[in-house]
Every structure is written in structure tokens, then in C-alpha cells.
Image: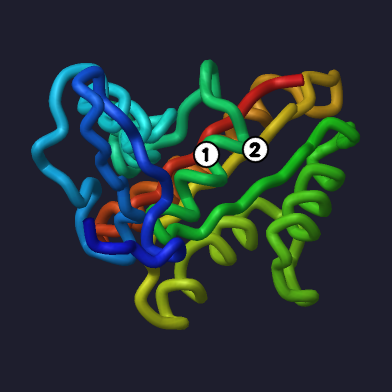
Amino acid sequence: MNPIAPIEADFMAETDDGARHFLFHPQVHGYGLADMSIRGPLRESATEMETPLRKDQETLLRGVRPNIVQAIRAYRVHDLQETARVLGHHFLYANLAHAQTKQDILELIATQFTFPAHFGKNFDALYDCMTDPLHKSGPQPGFIVVLEQIPTTAKFDKEVREQLLDIFRDAADYWSDRKIAFRCFYSFL
């Protein structure tokens, strides 16, 4: 038997008939298993080990239109952030739980999205910061936006909440016209 350098072999497995098989690290050799003659339970366990515990992150958004504003529902923020990373998209997150008014919301979004200091703190300025300057700065890979815990206070009533979400719907339309994904997820406090 040829000796195998320890750095190349991840481990050695033995089948029921006593045959030994070396399993190699896939990145070293470009393939998953060095010995393709593995049979029975060993093949099944090796396949299970190569299968990731979580399916490809892109499947998280498989049923979600590329340009949409929708309730976050069953999505977890961390999963959306990881999906944005895998897809190479921008991830914008704002936790709005401490806001009471429209001005509070705009200030928190500006701070957490790192808008420029000259941001006008009104809905028109919010739309402008989410669209044209970004488009003019060069090619954009896509966006996943999370607005978490939008308040439901008397000073931030249903009408104002809808105006806020309309800004993000308009931004989604803007990026849709340019064939760039813009998905916005939100939740209420």
C-alpha cells in the first residue's frame, strides 16, 4: 500500500468487508472522495458528511420576488444577512424599536444605514438616498433591507407607517427598472 501524507487524508474508513478507504479533503484534490468504489453504509455516511446542514442560502429567497417590500414573517434577520453575504448584496438593517415619531424613525434609519450628514430627514430625502446616488456610484449587486420593529404609536400611526413602507416600495420599483434586486423586510413593534 502506498503511504499517504497525513496532510492529504482527512481520515480512513473501514467497510464491513475489512477494506480500508482513505477519504481526502475535497479542496486539496478537487473532488469529494478519493476512492469512488465505496459501497453501502460507508457511501451513505460519506454523502451525509458532504451534504451541508443548511441548503444553499439562495433558496431562502427562492420564492421571494427580487423587488418587493414584505413582512419579515418567518425569516430571521441573521439568515437574511447571511443570504445577502452569500449573494454579494448590500445588507441594510435598522432596528426602530426606540423610535416614537417620524423624525425618530428617519434619524435611526439615517444613522444605521450610514447616510451622509446632509441627509434631509424627510421621506423625499430617504427615497433619494436609497436610489439615485447609489445608482450613480457604480454597479450595484442588489439589496436586502430589514426594518425591524417599526413602532405602532399614536405619533407614528398607520398612515405614516404606510408612507414609510411606500418609500421602500418606490425604491424597489426604482431598482427593478434597473434589473437590480431590492428586497425589503419589515416587522412592527
Residue 61 visible here = no
**Mark 2: which secondary structure?**
strand
Residue named by callout 1: 80
- The total of numbered circles placed on residues is 2
Residue 118: x, y in percent?
Answer: 76, 76
Q: Earlier in the sequence, mark 2 or mark 1?
A: 1
Q: Quadrant of the N terminus?
A: bottom left
Q: Quadrant of residue 47?
A: top left
What amino acid does circle 2 point to? Answer: Leu
Residue under the image location 68 percent in, 31 percent down: 160
Q: Which residue lies under the disc numbered 2? A: 147
**C-alpha gap between disc 2 and disc 1:** 12 Å
Residue 82 at least partly seen? yes
| Labels 2 and 1 touching (C-beta < 8 A) | no
Residue sitting at x 32%, y 53%: 24
In the rendered structure, which amino acid carries the disc numbered 1?
A: Leu
For the point 65% across and 38% down, the residue is 147
Residue occupying image coordinates x 64% and y 51%: 123
Q: Residues within 10 Å of mark 1 (few under 14, many from 20)?
A: many
